[in-house]
Image: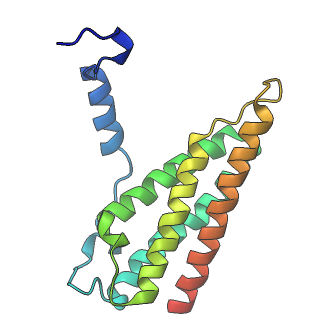
């Protein structure tokens, strides 16, 4: 074995870390048994529009909740931040139940593919927003953290608006 400084060696994650990650994943947001997202049937062409739109509606409804929660979180509301993170976990669970990565495949129904991409882009930007710690004004990096959070939130809202508009046209 090459003798490397301790900081450069691969270290096995602790059992507690692995257990906490497993619990966090398991508690990430259960999808109700009556959710349309858990009942999708995939073919080579993707999912039929009539079957998929109720599931997409559940995702759009979660995004409808998330938008004001994230705005309030940016303003410093800790409860809104916590609620928004819970809503985002529920949205991730819905997407996972709907097929996870399959949602990013190209479907024969191009507008549904576009809808999935807009939803995915919104979720990705909300994920980034919630990863940014908004520092209080006394920090020398407060302005940069706030600017980064505002940028991610703006991108999330733009992708969400695109998804919501396309969903309404498809209904």
> Is residue 51 shown above or below 116?
below
Lateral position of residue 13 relative to residue 113, left or right: left
Q: Quadrant of residue 113?
A: bottom left
Q: Residue furthest right?
A: 137
Lateral position of residue 106 relative to residue 168, left or right: left
Residue at 32% of width from left, 25% of height from top? Answer: 17
Q: Nearer the viewer, residue 31 or 70?
A: 70
Lateral position of residue 159 relative to residue 114, left or right: right
- Colouring scheme, one of rainbow, by chain, secondary structure, one colour: rainbow
> Is residue 126 shown above or below 15?
below
Residue at 38% of width from left, 63% of height from top? Answer: 94
Q: Nearer the viewer, residue 159 or 69?
A: 159
Residue 19 in view here? yes
Quadrant in the picture for the N terminus: top left
Residue at 62% of width from left, 61% of height from top? Answer: 156
Q: Position of residue 121 (x, y in %)?
A: 52, 65
Q: Residue furthest left?
A: 1
Q: Position of residue 7 (x, y in %)?
A: 38, 14
Count of numbered circles in the view: 0
Q: Position of residue 58 (x, y in %)?
A: 45, 71
Residue 34 in view here? no
Residue at 60% of width from left, 69% of height from top? Answer: 159
Q: Position of residue 53 (x, y in %)?
A: 41, 83
Q: Nearer the viewer, residue 115 or 168?
A: 115
């Amino acid at each position: 074995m090459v003798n490397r400084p301790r900081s450069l060696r691969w270290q096995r994650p602790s059992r507690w870390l692995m257990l906490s990650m497993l619990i966090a994943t398991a508690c990430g947001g259960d999808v109700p048994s009556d959710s349309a997202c858990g009942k999708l049937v995939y073919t080579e062409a993707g999912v039929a529009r009539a079957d998929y739109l109720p599931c997409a509606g559940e995702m759009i409804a979660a995004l409808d909740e998330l938008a004001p929660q994230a705005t309030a979180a940016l303003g410093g509301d800790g409860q809104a931040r916590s609620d928004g993170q819970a809503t985002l976990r529920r949205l991730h669970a819905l997407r996972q139940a709907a097929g996870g990565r399959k949602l990013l495949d190209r479907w024969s129904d191009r507008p549904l593919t576009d809808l999935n991409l807009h939803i995915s882009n919104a979720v990705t930007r909300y994920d980034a927003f919630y990863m940014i710690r908004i520092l209080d004004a006394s920090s020398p990096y407060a302005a940069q953290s706030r600017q980064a959070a505002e940028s991610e939130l703006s991108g999330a809202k733009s992708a969400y608006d695109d998804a919501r508009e396309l969903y309404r046209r498809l209904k």
